[in-house]
Amino acid sequence: MKRVGLKSQKFFKRWQRHLEDYLNSVALRLEETAKTAEAESIHQLRVSIRRTRVMIHLGPFICGKSNAEKFHAWSKRVADTVGRVRDYDIAIDWLRGQSAGAQLIAQVEQRRVRLWRAASRRLTPIPMTLRDAFFDLDPGVRKRNLLKKRFVEWNQELRDGILGDVGKLRKLGIEDQHELRRWLRRLRYLIEMVLGRRKQKRDRYLRQLIRLQRALGEMQDRIVVDDILQRLKATPRIRALRNKLIQERTSWLYKAEHELITLARL
């Protein structure tokens, strides 16, 4: 994406609107999560945090480097706090889909409850002074131009990095595969920022990127579930479930490879 069909002022306004919307979403999702501890609230909280980070990373010279660093530190602490609980939510959902048995599911649910009790005590809202620092920003022309330039450069950097993994997905380690998924998320959020909702539905590249992101996510979810099952006492049922996870992980890896090749052709 070498050109963005928005003038610098309009591009800045769109970025500012997304940043403020995501910050409001973070506050709302955090409140919901603290009250309900529901899986969907935790998931949406983490998504809102990721989207906000991308917007801030795009324009730290507008937000202020110190504010950007403070938000990163706060959001990382919150995301890490609920992240392990989210892993158990993924495992519970998968086990239910496998009809794994009430006793086994209850065992995993009990561990989730204990994790949440510990996590909930560490959840803190974003300081209002920090949150307010990202609202009503009014940069000069030079910084608005730099924001748009940074978008084009980062967009291309992510695309090049993603395409660099074509044909190598199976050779990548788990952490490198996870990093690829991070690149996909960041690129998706950038593209969605400049495209309206109608254009998002019609954009072939974005739709294909989301397919690839989903395939990698499903594959990595199997790794998460397997890690949790390893912590339980080995039984014939546990071993059978872990074998099923291996099969599904391999299937999703092949799917991701196909989706990556398809993306490279667009």
Image: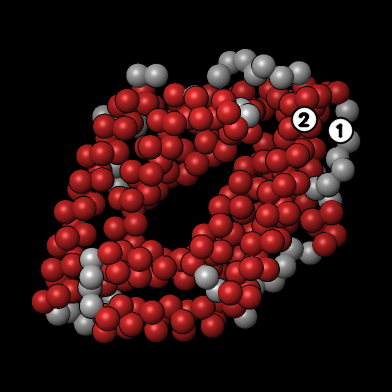
Q: Locate residue 169, reporting x and y percent.
A: 28, 37
Instruction: Tell me which corner region of the image, top left, top right, bottom left or bottom right, holds residue 190.
Output: top right
Q: In the rendered view, does 128 fall on the left or right side of 214?
A: right
Q: Position of residue 104 (x, y in %)?
A: 26, 80
Going by the numbered disc 2, the residue's amino acid type is: Phe
- Which of the labelled discs sits on residue 115, or is there none? none
Residue located beneath label 1 in the image: 139
Inspect the image, locate mark 1, and give the three-letter code of the amino acid beneath it.
Answer: Pro
Residue at the spot of label 2: 12
Residue 258 in the image, given as x and y percentages of width and height? 26, 32
> Which of the colour schemes (rainbow, by chain, secondary structure, one colour) is used?
secondary structure
The answer for how far apart the CA atoms under marks 1 and 2 are is 9 Å
Relative vertical location of residue 124 with respect to residue 203 in this rendering, above or below: below
Give the residue displayed 51% in from the left and 30% down from the top: 201
Label 2: how many residues lie within 10 Å, few (<14), some (14-19) or many (20+)? many
Residue in the image at 14% along x and 75% along y: 237
Quarter of the image that includes the N terminus = top right
Residue at 35% from the left image edge and 45% from the top image edge: 216
Residue at image position (39%, 19%) is 266
User: Left or right: 101 with respect to 158?
Assistant: left
Does residue 33 appear anywhere in the picture?
A: yes
Task: Give the vertical position of 146 relative to 73 (above or below).
Answer: above
Residue pushed farthest front? 198
* 160 or 11, nearer to the observer: 11
Marks 1,2: beta carbons within 8 A:
yes
Q: Hey, which quadrant is residue 62 in on the image?
A: top right
The quadrant in which residue 242 appears is bottom left
Q: Number of callouts in the render?
A: 2
Say which label, 1 or 2, has the lower sequence index: 2
SS at badge 1: loop
